[in-house]
Amino acid sequence: MASQRVFPLSCAVQQYAWGKMGSNSEVARLLASSDPLARISEDKPYAELWMGTHPRGDAKILDSRISQRTLGQWIAENQDCLGSKVKDTFNGKLPFLFKVLSVETALSIQAHPNKELAEKLHLQAPQHYPDSNHKPEMAIALTSFQGLCGFRPVEEIVTFLTKVPEFQFLVGDNATTQLKQSLSQDSQAMASALQSGFSHLMESKKQLVVEQLNLLVKRISQQDCVECMACSDNTVRAGLTSKFIDVPTLCEMLSYTPSPSKDRLFPPKWSQEDPYLSLYAPPVPDFAVMKMEVPGSVTEYKVSALDSASILLMVQGTVTASTPTAQAEIPLKRGGVLFIGANESVSLKLTVPEDLLIFRACCLL
């Protein structure tokens, strides 16, 4: 009898403080839709849905015929399910973590090291760097959102420093001078100036930040924003008039969104030792997220086999999934998650005549 290589998962939810609260969160709604026993607490945030084998959120297998309780345990004993290239390249481990984020407030500022530096930092200080892996990322928007990624061109930052004295105060006179002078210098000089200004801003005392933001809000409320800032950047203006005004608002004057797409964001490629030297990074070629839209008039849809393990998320629709190796059909509805082993195809039969929206994460080598 063939081993079970396609099965449903129950996935971990992370309740970080920046997540949307209760049923306002898409993460919570997906959870409630897929699990009739789930109870959503309206006073708690539901920030991230993790679909993968991360130690802090290893997905549980929803098939009593499989002896292993979690996806990570099952993959450890069935490494061929990853696909031959993936298995060899990533030492028998699932090389991606598929997530859904539901964001209420600004996330913490992050800089992810590359693989070589991640391993070095993990060895030096595992308490601060618990993961030896790099974290190439891709974000796909399910709804409208604002994302800041990388640094603006220095010319734009200098313009903000000239037009917004409160911003210049927190960046510091020395860094401001450095940034202006770096316009005629090399990239290392720009990086050094960015490091100085960014560090000065982030290390400013909370009281000073509040004072300068209050001055800024008072000033722009008395003047025309465009005339005052010489800026048509709606993102910055929206942030300045927001109820939640803090350091991330000021960071909008340093950061920008480099993605050419309206619905995808790829973080920049950092240099190993200096995150202030960044280049726009195209999509990571080894990892992919496929979007599948199927009209409700279609009665059956086939998910093709790949030489990679994959994880499928149902965002909209109701189906039953079947495969040559499955002993029974697997019901899936909104919020349902399905693990698909390498070289396995899956047939989805629509049980309700409504459009399907499905995302599938995999590793294509």
Image: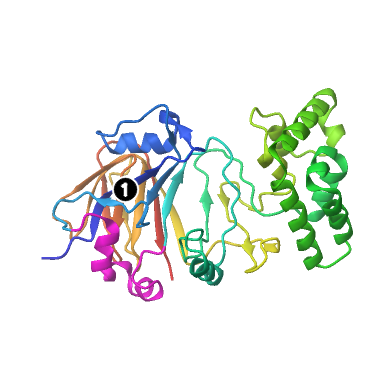
Q: What is the x, y in percent for residue 146?
A: 61, 41
Name the quarter where the N terminus is drawn.
bottom left
Residue 252 in view (yes/no):
no
Name the quarter where the C terminus is drawn.
bottom left
Q: Specify few, some or many for label 1: CA neighbours under 10 Å numbering under 14, 14-19, or 20 or more.
A: many
Relative vertical location of residue 273 with respect to residue 257 in this rendering, above or below = below
Q: What is the x, y in percent for residue 31?
A: 34, 38
Kindly identify which residue carries mark 1.
337
Judging depth in this view, the residue of 46 and 273 nearest the camera is 273
Relative vertical location of residue 85 with respect to residue 325 in this rendering, above or below = below
Secondary structure beneath dot 1 equals strand
Relative vertical location of residue 360 with respect to residue 354 in this rendering, above or below = below
Q: Which residues are magenta?
A: 68-95
User: In the image, is residue 196 part of the stretch drawn in magenta?
Assistant: no
Tell me: 67 left or right of 151: left
Tell me: 98 left or right of 323: right
Q: What is the x, y in percent for residue 109?
A: 61, 49
Tell me: 190 left or right of 347: right
Query: Which SS type dominates the magenta stretch?
Result: helix
Q: What is the x, y in percent for residue 291?
A: 44, 51
Residue 93 in view (yes/no):
yes
Judging depth in this view, the residue of 328 and 258 nearest the camera is 258
Residue type at tag 1: Val
- What residue is rendered at 33% in x and 63% in y? 309
